């Protein structure tokens, strides 16, 4: 690091002394955070792991000698038991999966489009638009949920607006019908074939899995896009601004249309940002809790039940602490798998020669 | 337009560019209109929120879209401040947020500096540990943080509200990446002058880090003001309720009788004011920091 | 260089000391197993580090899950009166989420000293040792209704005193009734009559009969059809019996015909709110509606009649809570004394006055009928009331049942009831292991 030109002896002595000094200081400086993080992140994870493998019933300390190790019983009941625990998990996973399917692409695309539009050269009022789109992101999810409960009530603002175009809006947060089921119903499919209704996964029939997000969940999906598009728009803006304008202009001179420029230059250079946005989106979407706790508590008809809320509910409302902890770890595993899968999907792959962009403008 | 185009202008290129310039003006108008419409969609709900808080319950239900109440009434706010514990919640939120922000700023910069500039045995371990910590999703911690807070005897106490929130691995890395940009020469000079590590950090490095400290401060403020799940599990004493938990109870708990929308919206509006003010004051900095708080 | 060296060392020691203190605090209060709080049958005594809010002989912390301001005020007054009498301080808190706060209290070793324990959560609390059985310390045990005492007996011991009970009856808006041209003779006594009357009362913007879409209301129809949820011996779940299917189908048909509705469908939080905000002309609710109507909706004039009989005869549901005292409290004696006060005949009649619940002691029955002839229907319904399902683990099954009921209008009653039966049977089997 400090390449001294001093004589060897003095160098050694100084380095030895400076290493000792830094040891104490280094540890003194990092210890507070290490202790805090250890106590409130690492230890809880271990404790949750223990509780998920034990039969602690909710009284006294989970580390008391009377609490027994029961192996994988909680996980067994949860994943293979086939009873209410399993179907609850299946339902909550289904709900959250549809949430992810709708929210992540929407928020990525919308924030990208907003960023591109706001980033245009000669744009006046950039600051105003950026502020307007980002503002919802600074509010707390509790405040936004309360606002949403009002806007989407049966006689609320949204239904009034829908009324202008002649559509009788649903009682949003009380409607448990799945959107896909409604669509299929419009196409005339009302009852599921036996194959779908008879079999299932995690205690939930395939027909249930295909139900799509419920109308209530759709309101939450809109809320998620509303509150996160601003944050991701900023990420895209930063990336767009770091794309050198020269490249863009050179391509323009060469005769590339704006659409071509966007597709062949901007988008590929935004790839890492898109990966980041999607990863952050995935990690966040799988942990939906605050809005559910404030808004619907898993209803109507368990269609806004998410694994995070299920974990809380099982532990705090039903005193099934072991099961709650097990659900949390199942969710942990799911998040890890999804994140890894998504990163693998978006890994940098070499493009065929024809499509590569050569800065000098001359394909070789 | 630019020098490049001027240089390479040929008749053809000039004509093409000119042709493209014309539709662009029309296109710009369309873009502006679209952006304005979207901005309206983003802002209107908040305007409705404020307006509704000044309406009566009946008017809120019958006329949800209008921005101007037929009869202005502050009944909702009166009820909020006189007949609920809202002032207590506000006070608690302020206290917790200030303490957590101060704690995080201080401890993050300590640890960030050590990881950036101090060589010590085990540095790699600490680094790896903090990275691993960041990979743990918050949802896993909901139940066990409650258990740990119990074990430590911090349940139903202010310490239990504040101390666990100070743990923040991400902030350490933000500070670390800033400290790495400080030229070593500065430290060398200070050390030669005889400063010990702590004095060096406190008097020389920290003043240079003010922008990053402000960033951490803003993120901490936002994060702890808007935190909910931690407050749910950390206490059940009504005197320790914070704004987020209190408003959530207003919206959904057994205490939320009837659809008193003006009351609930007013509560949510006031709750948003401090973060909104912070946002408008520090706009540039917040939006320059591309991390920002990720809300799902 | 020496001075700074020393200073860094000092700082390092300070930091290490700080961390050590933190660790000490950790070891101090919890990892040893919480001392007396986890000891199974330990009575009272002093609690460990994270102990209860009171410091022995101090004040009582009472946690209730109130149905409204009327109830909260009544309990406040009663507890204050007892405090004056006994000289012990007590504070009453109304829980936003009673079940969650209780479970947090039990897990943290800091539960409230006295709380409402609902019949469906009672077994769970008793089974894991959270409750202190004080039934043997009560002076007037024989005065409680036997059916209520049996709800709160676990393992042969009476754990807590029933605080009151309510039954479901039909609440009718008298103005709407007369406006629709109906008279006393039209008060429904059969399901067909109920359907007719509800249809007559349904007009634009208002539904004939609205009630909360949950087992705690629909179960009355099951009772009227002659069905029950669990067999007499408590071992088998009989939710999907033909009687129950008939009842659920009846409700579904009426909902689809537009004469019945769930409270949530008309934008209300519960049946009482739908009734009070005039979104419906009738509702099915229990005694507590009296307090809500007086306090929140004083302009609505109403009368109470027993629910109509179904194919299986008369039937309704009966609800009760008890005053729970936790094991992890050091105020057992004071709490029991407070319970004695609150379940006395005079005090129960005062509660009846405030929010209409019926006293749990038989000696107060006559007084109740005398003072509240308008609520005679509630008392009379007690004769044919069914208890709600209270087996351990059943609350999750009931929540799931309620969730399925949300889509009753388009659902299949047989399928819904069959799934509930499967789940309930699993819970019952689990308890017997």
Image (spheres, rainbow, N blue to C red):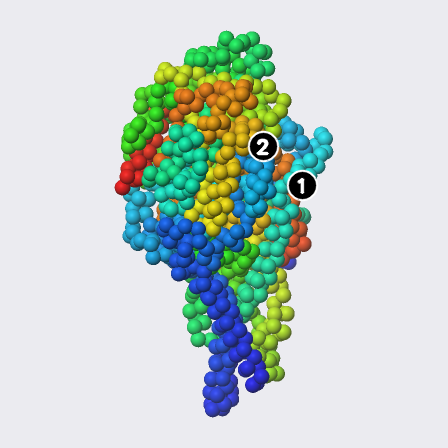
Residue under the image location 43 percent in, 70 percent down: B124
Residue under the image location 70 percent in, 32 percent down: B69
Mark 1 = which residue?
A: B82
Q: Position of residue A214 (x, y in %)?
A: 45, 34
Mark 2 = which residue?
A: C70
* Along the viewing direction, whichever of A335 and A189 lies nearer the viewer: A335
| Nearest to viewer (mark 2 / mark 1) | 2
Mark 2–mark 1 Cα distance, whole angstroms, equals 18 Å
Q: Few, some or many C-alpha atoms within 10 Å of disc 2 (few <14, some 14-19, many ≥20)? A: many
Q: Position of residue B62 (x, y in %)?
A: 63, 27
Q: For the residue labelled by badge 2, is the local secondary structure a helix, a strand or a loop?
A: helix
Q: Position of residue B80 (x, y in %)?
A: 65, 40
Quadrant, the N terminus of chain C = bottom right
Q: Are marks 2 and 1 on the same chain?
A: no
Residue C155 occupies quadrant? top left
Residue under the image location 47 percent in, 69 percent down: C20
State yes or no: discs 2 and 1 in contact (Cβ < 8 Å): no
Tell me the chain of label 2: C
* Along the viewing direction, whichever of A217 and B252 lies nearer the viewer: B252
Q: For the residue labelled by badge 1, is the local secondary structure a helix, a strand or a loop?
A: helix
Q: Position of residue C423 (x, y in %)?
A: 32, 34
Q: Is residue C56 above or below residue A164?
A: below
Residue B285 occupies quadrant? bottom right
């Amino acid at each position: 690091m400090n390449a001294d030109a001093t004589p060897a002896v003095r160098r050694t002595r100084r380095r030895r002394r400076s290493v000792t000094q830094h040891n104490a200081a280094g540890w003194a400086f990092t210890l507070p955070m290490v202790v805090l993080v250890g106590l409130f992140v690492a230890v809880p994870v271990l404790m949750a792991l223990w509780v998920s493998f034990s039969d602690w019933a909710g009284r006294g300390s989970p580390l008391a000698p009377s609490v027994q190790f029961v192996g994988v019983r909680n996980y067994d009941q949860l994943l293979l038991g086939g009873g209410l625990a399993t179907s609850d998990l299946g339902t909550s996973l289904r709900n959250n999966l549809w949430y992810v399917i709708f929210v992540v692409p929407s928020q990525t695309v919308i924030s990208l489009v907003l960023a591109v539009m706001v980033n245009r050269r000669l744009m006046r009022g950039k600051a105003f638009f950026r502020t307007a789109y980002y503002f919802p992101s600074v509010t707390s999810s509790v405040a936004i949920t309360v606002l949403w409960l009002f806007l989407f009530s049966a006689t609320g603002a949204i239904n009034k607006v829908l009324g202008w175009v002649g559509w009788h809006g649903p009682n949003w947060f009380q409607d448990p019908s799945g959107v896909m089921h409604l669509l299929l119903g419009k196409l005339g499919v009302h009852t599921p074939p036996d194959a779908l209704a008879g079999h299932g996964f995690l205690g939930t029939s395939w027909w249930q899995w295909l139900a799509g997000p419920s109308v209530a969940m759709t309101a939450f999906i809109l809320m998620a896009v509303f509150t996160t598009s601003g944050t991701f728009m900023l990420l895209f803006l930063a990336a767009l601004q770091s794309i050198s304008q020269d490249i863009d202009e050179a391509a323009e001179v060469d005769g590339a249309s704006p659409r071509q420029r966007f597709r062949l230059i901007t988008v590929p250079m935004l790839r890492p940002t898109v990966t980041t946005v999607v990863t952050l989106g995935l990690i966040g979407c799988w942990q939906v809790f605050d809005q559910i706790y404030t808004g619907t508590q898993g209803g109507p008809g368990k269609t806004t039940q998410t694994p995070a809320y299920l974990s809380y509910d099982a532990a705090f409302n039903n005193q099934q602490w072991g099961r709650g902890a097990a659900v949390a770890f199942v969710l942990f595993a799911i998040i890890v798998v999804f994140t890894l899968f998504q990163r693998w999907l978006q890994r940098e792959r070499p493009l065929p020669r024809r499509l590569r962009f050569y800065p000098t403008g001359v394909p070789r | 337009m630019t020098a490049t185009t001027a240089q390479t202008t040929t008749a053809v290129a000039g004509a093409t560019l000119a042709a493209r310039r014309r539709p662009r003006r029309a296109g710009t108008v369309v873009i502006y209109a679209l952006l304005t419409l979207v901005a309206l969609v983003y802002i209107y709900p908040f305007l409705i929120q404020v307006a509704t808080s000044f309406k009566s319950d009946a008017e809120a239900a019958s006329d949800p879209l209008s921005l101007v109440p037929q009869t202005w009434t502050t009944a909702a706010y009166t009820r909020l401040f006189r007949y609920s514990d809202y002032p207590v919640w506000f006070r608690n939120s302020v206290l917790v947020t200030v303490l957590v922000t101060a704690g995080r700023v201080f401890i993050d910069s300590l640890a960030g500096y050590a990881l950036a500039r101090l060589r010590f045995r085990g540095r790699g371990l600490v680094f790896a540990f903090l990275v691993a910590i960041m990979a743990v999703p918050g949802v896993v911690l909901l139940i066990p943080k409650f258990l740990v807070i119990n074990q430590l005897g911090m349940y139903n106490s202010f310490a239990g509200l504040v101390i666990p929130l100070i743990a923040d691995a991400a902030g350490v890395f933000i500070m670390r990446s800033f400290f790495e940009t400080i030229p070593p020469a500065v430290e060398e000079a200070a050390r030669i002058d005889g400063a010990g590590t702590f004095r060096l950090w406190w008097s020389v490095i920290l003043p240079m880090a003010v922008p990053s400290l402000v960033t951490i401060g803003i993120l901490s403020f936002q994060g702890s003001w808007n935190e909910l799940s931690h407050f749910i599990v950390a206490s059940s004493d009504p005197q320790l309720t914070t704004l987020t938990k209190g408003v959530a109870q207003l919206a959904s708990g057994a205490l939320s009788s009837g659809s008193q929308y003006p009351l609930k919206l007013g509560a949510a509006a006031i709750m948003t004011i401090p973060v909104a003010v912070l946002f408008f004051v520090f706009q540039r900095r917040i939006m320059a920091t591309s991390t920002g708080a990720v809300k799902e | 260089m020496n001075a700074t060296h020393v200073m860094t060392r000092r700082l390092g020691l300070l930091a290490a000391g700080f961390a050590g203190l933190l660790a000490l605090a950790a070891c101090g209060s919890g990892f040893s197993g919480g001392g007396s709080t986890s000891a199974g049958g330990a009575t009272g005594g002093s609690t460990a580090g994270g102990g209860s809010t009171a410091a022995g002989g101090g004040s009582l912390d009472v946690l209730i899950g109130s149905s409204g301001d009327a109830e909260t005020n009544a309990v406040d007054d009663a507890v204050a009166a007892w405090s004056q009498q006994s000289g012990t301080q007590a504070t009453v808190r109304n829980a936003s989420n009673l079940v969650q706060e209780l479970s947090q209290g039990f897990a943290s070793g800091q539960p409230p000293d006295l709380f409402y324990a609902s019949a469906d959560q009672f077994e769970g609390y008793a089974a894991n040792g959270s409750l202190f059985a004080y039934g043997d310390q009560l002076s007037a045990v024989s005065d409680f209704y036997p059916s209520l005492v049996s709800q709160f007996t676990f393992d042969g011991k009476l754990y807590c005193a029933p605080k009151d009970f309510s039954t479901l009856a039909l609440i009718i808006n008298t103005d709407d009734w007369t406006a629709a041209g109906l008279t006393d003779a039209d008060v429904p006594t059969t399901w067909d009559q109920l359907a007719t009357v509800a249809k007559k009362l349904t007009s634009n913007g208002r539904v004939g009969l609205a009630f909360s879409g949950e087992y705690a209301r629909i179960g009355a129809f099951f009772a009227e059809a002659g069905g029950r949820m669990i067999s007499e011996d408590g071992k088998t779940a009989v939710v999907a019996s033909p009687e129950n299917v008939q009842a659920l189908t009846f409700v579904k048909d009426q909902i689809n015909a537009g004469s019945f509705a769930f409270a949530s469908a008309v934008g209300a939080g519960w049946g009482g709110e739908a009734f009070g905000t005039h979104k419906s002309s009738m509702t099915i609710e229990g005694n507590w509606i009296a307090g809500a109507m007086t306090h929140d909706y004083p302009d609505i004039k109403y009368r109470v009649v027993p629910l109509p009989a179904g194919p299986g005869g008369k039937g309704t549901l009966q609800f009760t809570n008890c005053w729970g005292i936790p094991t992890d409290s050091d105020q057992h004696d004071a709490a029991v004394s407070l319970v004695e006060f609150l379940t006395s005949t005079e005090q129960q009649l005062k509660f009846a006055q405030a929010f209409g619940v019926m006293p749990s002691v038989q000696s107060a029955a006559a007084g109740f009928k005398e003072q509240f002839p308008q609520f005679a229907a509630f008392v009379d319904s007690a004769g044919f009331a069914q208890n709600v399902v209270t087996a351990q683990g059943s609350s999750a099954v009931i929540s799931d049942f309620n969730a399925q009921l949300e889509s009753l209008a388009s659902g299949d009653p047989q399928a819904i009831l069959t799934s509930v039966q499967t789940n309930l049977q699993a819970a019952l089997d689990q308890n017997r292991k």
